[in-house]
Image (tube, rainbow, N blue to C red):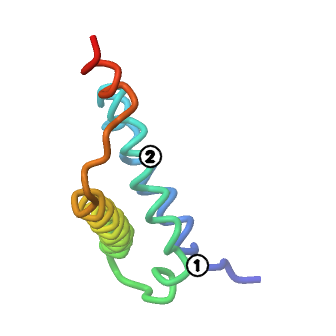
Amino acid sequence: MGRTNPTYRDALRAIEERWTDFRRALRRRDQPHFDRLFAYAREHADASGLLNHQNSLLPALFSIDLEQEARLDDHEDRLEELEEAVRALGDQPDQPHENDQTRGSQ
């Protein structure tokens, strides 16, 4: 039987192993962020494997960019919702707070 070609997931695992010393040198607070980047790359391993690119790092980087773009979109949507909520509160007539009534009588 012939040998099978390594899968993209194998290549990604090899990339991650090559970056182990870099990860270890990072400050502890940055290590989870580093790990998350590889998790993003693994999320798109099926699509990256179909690409069958010569340099397996490029699809990984693109996968990371794709996930970060999705996160940015989510944050922008949440920010827009919060801004709308704040505007809606600003459009309401002032209503005295229960503590405001007690302060005036003191």
Residue drawn at point x = 32 percent, y = 71 percent: 73
Q: How crowded is mark 2: few (under 14 residues within 10 Å), some or many (20 or more)?
A: few
Q: In which quarter of the image is residue 67?
A: bottom left
Disc 1, SS: loop
Q: Which mark is residue 35?
A: 2
**Mark toward the viewer: 2 or 1:** 2
Query: Does residue 106 appear left or right of residue 8 in this picture?
Result: left
Residue matched to label 1: 5
In the rendered image, residue 40, in percent from the top left (x then y), is placed at 45, 62
Pinpoint residue 58: horizontal percent, then vertical percent: 30, 73
Q: In which image quadrant can residue 10 be found? A: bottom right
Q: How many labels does the image show?
A: 2
* Extreme residue in the front direction: 105
Q: What residue type is labelled 2?
A: Asp
Q: Do the residues labelled 2 and 1 touch (CB within 8 Å)?
A: no
Residue 60's disc is none
Left or right: 53 with respect to 106?
Answer: right
Which residue is depicted at the point 50% across and 84% down?
47
In the displayed structure, 98 sits above or below 45; it is above
- Quarter holding residue 71: bottom left
Image spot of residue 1 (x, y percent): 77, 83
| 43, above or below 86, in the image | below
Find numbered disc 2 in the image and state the secondary structure of the residue it sits on. helix
Q: Can residue 56 be seen in this view?
A: no
Task: Name the amino acid type tagged 1.
Answer: Asn
* Residue 39 can be seen, yes or no: yes
Answer with mark 2 or mark 1, whichever residue precedes in sequence: 1
Residue sitting nearer the eye, 59 or 81: 81
Q: Nearer the viewer, residue 77 or 54?
A: 77
Seen at 31% across and 39% down, the residue is 96
Residue 50 drawn at (x, y percent): 50, 89
Observer-nearest residue: 52 or 26?
26
